[in-house]
Structure formats: structure tokens, C-alpha cells
């Protein structure tokens, strides 16, 4: 039995990394997908790949920091499939700077993408899930929503906000059969990480140091995050809500 058979799922930040792995995994498990991302060509490739494998997915180019794009994605899911069973807010950006090096515009943009966009998507989707009699929300936070790291105070603050938003919504809507959880990836081998390393003086050395810093001695994969995400949005975790689940190879255990 496919774990997401006939479930209507909206994923933001779907074209790359964890979002892409989740889209492929969810499609294999029978989900009907609406995939949103700013990267139009990669999004189209993903939608095509899912279709070739017998899955069902619609792509929508959009920027989560723009409320009208969020609303369009939710409307597309509802109009196309008749429900929004799962909302997976995965889109996010990084800001590896000390606070004194960060501009007001950078802070505003990061919070618009990482925090405000999730609040808006949840606010738009909650009435739909209430009418349906339930639903599931999953927000991608980070290990930095649980523990701090150097040179990323604004990013850490944004991911901490995502964790507490998930917990607060979980309490508010538990009696309405709406579950809300946060996924907290550690250092995962994704295009975002590689881009971050490429800006370092020694990119190869940086990637090696990321692996060495993990208790398990290696980076996580997007597919491992997708496995955890699938569990959190499926009925297998039906009594799990308000959880911030680390997928970090033990990083936050210390």
C-alpha cells in the first residue's frame, strides 16, 4: 500500500536538494503534487521526471516571499485535486554573516523567505484543512533551529522561529486533526551546501571539514531527509505533532 495514495501535497522549494528528493519520494508513494520553486527549468525537469515514472505533479514557478505566489500555489492544489492534504514548506535561504555585517534588507529578505512565507502558507491553508477535517503540515527548519552555529545569527534566529511556529500551531490545531511538525536537517550534501563551500577559500577542504564535524563522520543525504519527511507526513506518524525532528547524524546530541 502506498503511504500517500491520493494525498494532495504542496511542496515549496521543490526543485533542488531536499525538496527534490521529497517530491520524488512522495510521488513514488502515490501523492498528487503541486511543486513550487523559483528555479523554473529545474522544476520543469522534475515534473517531467515524475511524469515519466508514472507519478502526477504540477509545477508552478513562484517566490514564497510573495504572498500572491503562495496563494496561487494553494489554489492550484485545491482546484486541481480538490484538497490540500499536506503542506510542506521547504523553501529557505542562508545568510552566513555576522550580525554587524548584515544589512536591514538582508535580514528582512531572509525572514520573508524563511519565516513569514511559512506563516502565510499556513494561514492560507488552515481553513482548507479545517473544512476537510484534518491535514498535515511540515516545515523545514534546521539543526540551527535547535543549536546555534557561528557566523549565522540571523539564519539561526529564523530557523528557531520555524521550530516554535510548528510547535505553537500543533497545539492550536491538535483537536482539529491537523498535525504540524518541523524537519531539522543537519549538514546535508545538497547544491546549497556546495554553493556555500564554493565561496570559501578552499572549497574541497571545507566539504571535508563538514564531514569530519559529524558524529557519524559523513554528510547526510537529501534522500535520508526525504525518508524522514515521508514518515512525518504519512499516517505512520499519526500520533506525532509538535515535534522538531533532527536528521543530523547525531550533531545535536552532543
Image (tube, grey):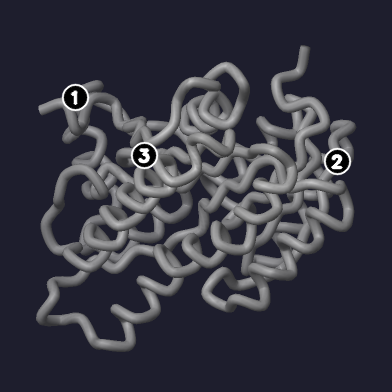
- Quarter containing the C terminus: top left
The label nearer to you, 1 versus 3, is 3
Q: Residue at x 44, y 38 (%)?
A: 181
Query: Tags 2 and 3 in contact by the CB under 8 Å rule?
Result: no
Q: Give the residue pinned by disc 1.
A: 215
The label nearer to you, 1 versus 2, is 2
Q: Residues within 10 Å of mark 2 (few under 14, many from 20)?
A: some
As measured in the structure, the alpha-carbon distance from the residue carrying label 1 to the one carrying label 2 is 38 Å
- Quarter containing the N terminus: top right
Q: Secondary structure at mark 3?
A: strand
As measured in the structure, the alpha-carbon distance from the residue carrying label 2 to the one carrying label 3 is 27 Å
18 shown above or below 34: above
Q: Secondary structure at mark 1?
A: loop
Tell me the tag on residue 56.
Answer: 2
Q: Quadrant of residue 247?
A: top left
As measured in the structure, the alpha-carbon distance from the residue carrying label 1 to the one carrying label 3 is 14 Å
Q: Give the residue pinned by disc 3.
A: 185
Q: Secondary structure at mark 2?
A: strand
Image coords of residue 253 (percent x, y): 16, 26
Q: Residue at x 30, y 66 (%)?
A: 199
Amino acid at each position: 500500500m502506498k503511504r500517500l495514495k491520493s494525498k494532495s501535497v504542496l511542496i515549496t522549494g521543490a526543485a533542488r536538494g531536499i525538496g527534490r528528493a521529497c517530491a520524488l519520494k512522495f510521488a513514488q508513494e502515490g501523492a498528487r503534487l503541486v511543486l513550487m520553486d523559483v528555479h523554473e527549468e529545474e522544476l520543469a525537469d522534475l515534473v517531467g521526471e515524475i511524469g515519466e515514472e508514472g507519478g502526477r505533479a504540477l509545477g508552478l514557478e513562484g517566490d514564497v516571499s510573495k504572498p500572491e505566489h503562495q496563494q496561487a500555489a494553494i489554489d492550484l492544489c485545491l482546484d486541481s485535486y480538490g484538497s490540500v492534504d499536506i503542506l510542506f514548506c521547504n523553501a529557505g535561504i542562508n545568510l552566513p554573516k555576522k550580525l554587524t555585517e548584515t544589512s536591514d534588507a538582508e535580514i528582512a529578505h531572509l525572514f520573508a523567505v524563511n519565516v513569514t512565507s511559512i506563516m502565510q502558507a499556513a494561514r492560507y491553508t488552515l481553513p482548507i484543512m479545517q473544512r476537510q477535517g484534518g491535514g498535515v503540515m511540515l516545515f523545514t527548519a534546521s539543526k540551527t533551529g535547535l543549536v546555534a552555529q557561528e557566523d549565522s545569527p540571523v539564519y539561526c534566529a529564523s530557523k528557531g522561529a520555524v521550530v516554535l511556529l510548528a510547535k505553537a500551531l500543533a497545539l492550536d490545531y491538535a483537536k482539529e486533526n491537523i498535525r504540524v511538525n518541523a524537519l531539522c536537517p543537519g549538514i546535508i550534501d545538497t547544491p546549497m551546501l556546495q554553493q556555500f563551500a564554493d565561496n570559501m577559500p578552499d572549497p574541497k577542504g571545507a566539504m571535508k571539514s563538514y564531514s569530519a564535524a559529524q558524529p557519524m563522520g559523513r554528510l547526510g543525504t537529501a534522500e535520508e531527509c526525504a525518508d524522514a519527511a515521508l514518515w512525518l507526513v504519512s499516517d505512520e506518524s499519526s500520533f506525532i505533532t509538535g515535534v522538531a525532528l533532527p536528521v543530523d547524524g547525531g550533531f545535536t546530541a552532543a
